Image: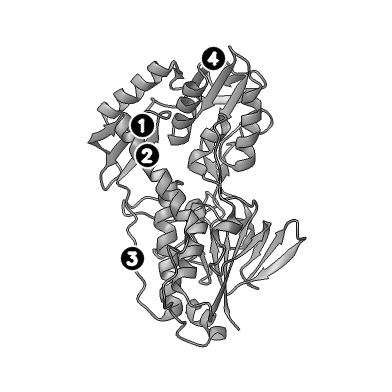
Amino acid sequence: MKHRIVVLGAGYAGAFAAGNLARRLSPADIEITVVNAVPDFVERMRLHQLAIGQDLTFRKLADVFAGTGVRLRLARVTGVDPQSRTVTVAGEEGDGELAYDTLLYTLGSSVAHHGVPGVAEYAFDVTGWSSALRLRERLAGLGAGGTVLVVGEGLTGIETATEFAESRPDVSVALAARGELGAWLSPKARRHLRQAFDRLGITVHEHTGIEAVEPTRAIAADATSIPADVTVWSAGFAVHPIAAASGLEVAETGQIVVDRTMRSVSHPNVYAAGDCAYAIGESGRPLPMSCASAGFTNMQATGAIIARLTGGEVPTTGLKYHGNHISLGRQDAIFQMVDGDVRPKSWYLGGRTAARLKSGVLRAAGWGIAHPTFGMPKRRRRLVTEPDQAGVRAAA
């Protein structure tokens, strides 16, 4: 019997991981199944562009994995049972159950409502395919003079506000920030950010926590009313409660607690990568939910899985950030370098050069997804034991 590897989720972490596993492990010993709810690879870093109406083409996962040996199951994950080593799913093919010997959990994250009244009913977000399309439809019907409020001063909030203001100069765009806009940037980069907001005509409400969202306005903590025909909520991310409900050890955030190799500390046949992994970076702090974290953690998880199944030495992937890259529309961006404690360095890159660099990063990520195995090698690694015993060794 072949060793069954099941990958839950085909976002940046899951898609890259599945391709890497297929590239480096022999199909004579393993079978890899990827479970994903939608048929396309969703480039989450570009969903704010999709929402504002730009024409984007996302790749079909069936095409991505064609010829790799990776099986694709289009379904929604409804449960995980680490005791019986099974996953329950629901989809067009009907409800079902998948058994695994090794599970790689990469279901990502969604928008965090933080219990704020009205967010679920009236706010929009750009954290998923369907939610971005819902916002796209709403913005298409928003006439000149309409108002858009983006809530949240993180990377998603800044990129969304600037993209919308650049693409729709006929509407008023505002951003509500709990603290100071760009407080985590160096002084020069912060000045560049503010100049971009001024150039694009974005109104900034600093030190403004939003306590409620209504159909045509948002209410701040001091009871101030901010006009908003459309409220876009980008005030953080949350993971699906499936992991916590499964009995896996999770942090207060609901993320799966993993060791340095991205292996669950409670269930050794389970690995996690991306936003759903509670992993400690080289700074000594948990890695933030981000595309960069998806890259670090999926490389570490796949490296560990391959090494443990084939008798090799488990590699150590660096979990260190070098900088933050922020798009400010299509023609401007900021690349802020950070030190080992993720504090901003004085050096930053801005303007068109930074925008071209960000565009290159997106193209490279897209190419990597389109070529998940980077060309199959002539010889792939065999398991160190008989396939039906590999899971036992992996758990040791």
Front residue of 338 and 281: 338
CA distance for labels 4 and 2: 26 Å
Mark 4, residue position: 170
Label 1 Cα neighbours within 10 Å, binned few <14 / some 14-19 / many ≥20: many
Query: Dividing the picture into quarters, in which one does residue 215 lie?
Result: top right
Mark 1, residue position: 333
Q: Secondary structure at mark 2?
A: helix
Q: Secondary structure at mark 1?
A: strand
Q: Residue at horizontal 64%, vertical 52%?
A: 39
81 relative position to 91: left or right: left
**Number of numbered tags placed on the structure image:** 4
Front residue of 90 and 54: 54
Query: Dividing the picture into quarters, in which one does residue 116 lie?
Result: top right
Give, as a three-letter code, the residue at label 3: Thr
Q: Earlier in the sequence, mark 4 or mark 1?
A: 4
CA distance for labels 3 and 1: 32 Å
Q: Are marks 2 and 1 in contact (CB under 8 Å)?
A: yes
Where residue 3 appears, as percent x and y from the top left, is: 56, 78
Front residue of 214 and 198: 198
Mark 3, residue position: 316
Q: Secondary structure at mark 3?
A: loop
371 relative position to 35: left or right: left
Give, as a three-letter code, the residue at label 2: Lys
Q: Are marks 4 and 1 in contact (CB under 8 Å)?
A: no
Mark 2, residue position: 358
Furthest toward the bottom, the residue is: 386
Front residue of 59 and 382: 59
